[in-house]
Image: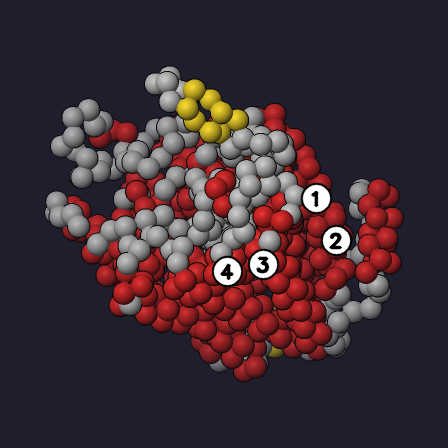
Amino acid sequence: MHTTDYLQFAAYAAIILATTQPLGRYMAALFSGQKTFLSPILQPVERLIYAICGVQENAEHSWKRYAGHLLLFALIGTITTYAILRLQHYLPFNPMGLPGVPPDLAMNTAVSFNTNTDWQAYSGEGTLSYFSQMTGLAVHNFLSAATGLAVAIAVIRGFARKSTKTIGNFYVDLTRGILYILLPISIVGALILVWQGVPQTIGGSVDAQTLEGARQTIVLGPVASQEVIKELGTNGGGFFNANSAHPFENPTPLSNFLENLLIFLIPAALVDTFGRMIGRRRQAYAIYGAMGILFIFTLSIAYFAEAMPNPALTQIAGYDPTQGNMEGKEVRFGLADSVLWAVTTSGSACGAVNAMFDSFMPLAGMVPLVNIMLGCIIFGGVGAGLYGMLLHVVIAVFIAGLMVGRTPEYVGKKIESREVKLALFALLATTAGTLILSSIASVTPAGVAGLGSAGPHGLTEILYAFASTDANNGSSFAGLSDNNIFYNVMLAATMLMGRFIVIVPILAIAGSFAAKKTVPTSYGAFPTDTGLFVALLIAVIVIIGGLTFFPALALGPIVEHFALSAGMGY
């Protein structure tokens, strides 16, 4: 434990806080139809896109139509990506002559990148051509992130509007998210990464001779452009198999810090956007406070768990217990950077990694697992974090209403049984998918065949894979060999469930709220912008997660912690 670690954590939090309001204000103006400083440059481009695609800018959708267009768009994107991967050996920019991707892996990857999961059951540099990386994956990093952002904005409109049947236009929200937010930041970010040493080329690989005299092939490619949207869009899919632990994706401590900032940049600002668009910024402060407290709490647990000596290494000559557990970490980043990244990438739906979770201490490895099980709501994926947190808000307000004996109210709208049922369905359906499918994998020969470890750690590997894909996170414990038909099909199904079983109910909730009238706050109503509500919201999140997942955690990382402390290995 070092003072510099705490200073780095504080600097990270301070920068995120400093960027929240400016970016939140910008997004609120953009999606409210107001002009921004980029409008003179980008508005002609935006209108040209609408003209080419036949989109009527002022024609809004009901929640059902909004969801229908979203699902159709996702289906077309998945089919297109699948075709690109299968046919990449016929397509250009394939200097290494890589063959087409096998059907089950192509299907898994297409679903992965179109659900903003970016789960990777393959080695990117040895499986995908530059064309597949750029058009099949990087493009969908923009599209899937913009889709989540569009859903969040539609949900915000549902809370903000009254007595209306529409919540916006999906294609307009999608276009503005890419054109005014994701693209400008990505262009600047990619140039910075190139400056830091990240490759951006369509040239082939180069050969080098190592100090030992061996010949090594070094794969290059259009890395910087994919790396920045990987983080900014909370996608997580790396150009290389080692992801952000690879020196070509993340070469310096500065690039590491900047990439880590990009993960929380938009999700944190979206909370401020929510407060501005509904005209009740104190409500946003309450949600932001709950997210911040959960972030600090989980970061503290992971950091102190990793800073402790590893009992499995204490007998090895030369091991320095004061350095904590450096197993599986890049020395150029160290323990603090690795832990901070692990908490941000799992608190969001990013999934990018700069260290191997499989090598974390059991309790430290449990932190990203728990963050994912809670739905990646600290601060969550682009859009997905906010609307995922709002599902918990609906449940918390309902419980508060029962406690005070009043009809539950939130931002001037009464919460009725329809909204509560939809919220519970979205929360329980996805968690049930995680537990049911992971239990099947843990007793199926095809499921256990790929385990890298036995005992509780092996169970954690399986559990993490299904929790990660269910929450559309995409990170893994890395010890599980999952590139086979069983896992490619099972995890693809989990990704689809985790994405759309949440999106459709939350859009239905938005439509229901938009149709309601705003009513004056009744006497005795539970205030939802105070510290007491923040405490209740956190309690609801923890209790729902605890009741659902504690038995599985007890059989995995918790029992492994006690076994490791007792000197037991598997």
Q: What residue is shown with label 4?
A: 103
Query: Rounded to the nearest whole Å, what is the CA distance between mark 3 and mark 1?
Result: 24 Å
The tag on residue 183 is 1
Residue type at mark 3: give it. Tyr
Query: Rounded to the nearest whole Å, what is the CA distance between mark 4 and mark 2?
Result: 34 Å
x%, y% of residue 372? 42, 57
The tag on residue 176 is 2
x%, y% of residue 24? 67, 49
Tell me the quarter of the picture where residue 518 sits.
bottom right
Question: For mark 3, does the 10 Å Cα neighbourhood hold few (<14), some (14 to 19), or many (20 or more) residues?
Answer: many
In the image, 450 versus 260, the foreground residue is 450
Question: For mark 2, does the 10 Å Cα neighbourhood hold few (<14), some (14 to 19), or many (20 or more) residues?
Answer: many
Question: For mark 1, does the 10 Å Cα neighbourhood hold few (<14), some (14 to 19), or many (20 or more) residues?
Answer: some
Question: For mark 4, does the 10 Å Cα neighbourhood hold few (<14), some (14 to 19), or many (20 or more) residues?
Answer: some
Specify whether residue 409 is in view: no
Give the residue displayed 82% in from the left and 54% down from the top. 49
Residue type at mark 2: give it. Arg
Query: Rounded to the nearest whole Å, what is the CA distance between mark 3 and mark 2?
Result: 26 Å
Give the residue displayed 17% in from the left and 50% down from the top. 570
